[in-house]
Image (cartoon, rainbow, N blue to C red):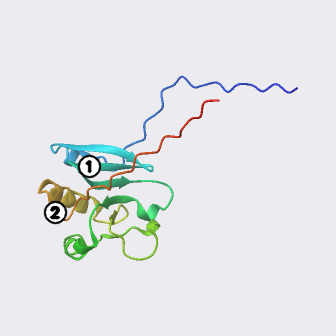
Amino acid sequence: MKKTKAKKKSVAPKQKKKIPFSFVLEELADLPIYTKPMFGCLGIYLDEKIVLILRDREDHPRDNGIWLATDQTHHTSLRKQIPSLRSIEIFGPGETAWQNLPSMEEEFEESALFVCSLIHKRDERIGRVPKKRKPKKQKSRTVR
């Protein structure tokens, strides 16, 4: 019979991930925003709407940047003001409702601050009310 050593649990506190593009949160600090971690990114909400996702990950670096929650009907008008906006590539080919302001763009910070100014004005083109999640069904337990 082989003895296995129990893994020692670390007592050190988990180190929090660095917030990507934290200047965006600073710019929106006077609004009633809140954040939620989402698939390795950070979602930013204003009232009941999600407005942005901040993404800076090693996988799919071309999609790092600021994801704008918008609708395809607003793409043309937003791109007139923010020419570097594009669809999110990891979602597959074709136009996506969400748009990416890529962090690799030369005018990234300037464009990001402009997006923040639109959010301050509560521009109707930015923000989506998330779909309600269905509650998880509880597994019924049988008594034996």
Q: What residue occupies the far right of the structure in this picture?
A: 1
| Residue in the image at 26% along x and 49% along y | 45
| Residue in the image at 33% along x and 54% along y | 53
Is 95 rendered above or below residue 61?
below
Identify which residue, 60 or 135, lies in the foreground.
135
Name the residue tied to disc 2. 124
Name the residue tied to disc 1. 45
Question: Residue 31, position in %: x, y?
Answer: 16, 45
Q: Secondary structure at mark 1?
A: strand
Q: Of the residues shown, which amino acid type is indicated by label 2?
A: Glu
Question: Residue 62, position in %: x, y?
Answer: 44, 65
Question: Residue 95, position in %: x, y?
Answer: 36, 75
Q: What residue occupies the far left of the structure in this picture?
A: 121
Is disc 1 in contact with disc 2, using a CB cutoff of under 8 Å? no
Q: Of the residues shown, which amino acid type is indicated by label 1?
A: Tyr
Mark 1 closeness class: few <14, some 14–19, many ≥20 residues within 10 Å: many
The quarter of the image holding the C terminus is: top right
Q: Which mark is residue 94?
A: none
* Count of numbered badges drawn on the protein: 2
